[in-house]
Amino acid sequence: MRLLRYFLFRVLQMFPIALFIVVINFALIHMAPGDVSILLAGEGADPDYMASVRESYGLDKPLIQQLGAYIGQLLQGDLGLSFRTREPVIDIIAERVPATLLLAGTALVLASVLGVLVGTVMARRPGSALDAAVTTISISLFSIPVFWLGLMLILLFAVTLRWLPSSGMMSVAGPREGLAYGLDVARHMILPVLSLTAVWLGQYVRLSRSSVSETLAEPYVTTARAIGFSERRVMTGFALRNALLPIVTVLGLELGLLLSGAVLTETVFSWPGLGRLIYEAILSRDTPVIMGAFLIMSFTVMLAALLTDLLYATLDPRVRL
């Protein structure tokens, strides 16, 4: 019952946060320099035509009225039309999201699983030469800018060795169905996934090692060992449950940032995902697409935070007291 009340309380908290995000999104776009009507009508357009464009898009109304109309659109699930292609923004975003989920999701799963495993093993061997080496490598990986690592991987494996493709999600003249298509996509994924995984792996190794080390030093773990529980039982039944709490928090935030976390990587590798879409929309000043992508990413972070809180409260009952 307490868990249900806690969940409902957190859901209610999301409504004012969502409204704040919508207002900030609208305000930032309309505070940006430049006149959108010039982009729509074209440079040197007739003043009368410019006025008609402003009127047709509601740009001649006060900002508060434009905001009200925008919120009304959102409540109907309408993110507007792209200035560049005249297609519904929701359809454009929906077309790009799977590519981002495939890329960033694969990297996040690999980084989190490998990071927790390596960090846990290193926590049981503190002070060893291997522990020092892994710690150094993880810090180095975490410190490397992901776009720089991506460029270096392209230079090595695509330009110098010519083993892997440097950009795109599939070959131009490649297959479009079946196993051959899947293998072609997987081949194009290797470099961008490797760059994201390497950077995220360093974070999870350091966090897992620190968390497990602190948990293993707790009195209840020492007591469990003194009672005679096996080391496996101590790790799985006592240590890891509490050690996973901070890892769950970080993983939840990473899940929320999944759609936006690969913007630089998608740009470097020309991966046709949401990050690349945002980059293209900014260059062409496609305001509805920028606003729609910002909202989708923000609401994804909100949902991930809510689910993380619920999971955290399930693992640690003290949170919902």
Image (cartoon, rainbow, N blue to C red):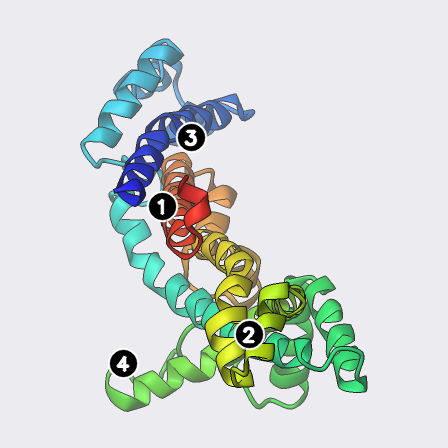
Q: Secondary structure at mark 3?
A: helix
Marker disc for residue 224: 2
Task: Quickly name the residue at label 3.
Answer: 21
Give the CA distance from mark 3 to mark 4.
39 Å
For marks 3 and 2 on the same chain, the one whose residue lies earlier in the sequence = 3
Task: Please tell me whether mark 1 or mark 4 is closer to you in this view.
Answer: 1
Instruction: Tell whether label 1 touches label 3 (CB within 8 Å).
Output: no
Could you tell which of marks 3 and 1 lies nearer the N-terminus?
Answer: 3
| Gap between marks 3 and 1 measured at Cα | 13 Å
Say whether residue 191 is visible. Answer: no
Q: Residue type at mark 4: give it.
A: Arg
Quarter residue 164 falls in: bottom right
* Quadrant, the C terminus: top left
Residue 268, disc = none
Residue assigned mark 1: 303
Residue drawn at x 27%, y 80% is 176
Q: Report how far apart the C-alphas of labels 1 and 2 lie in the structure.
A: 37 Å
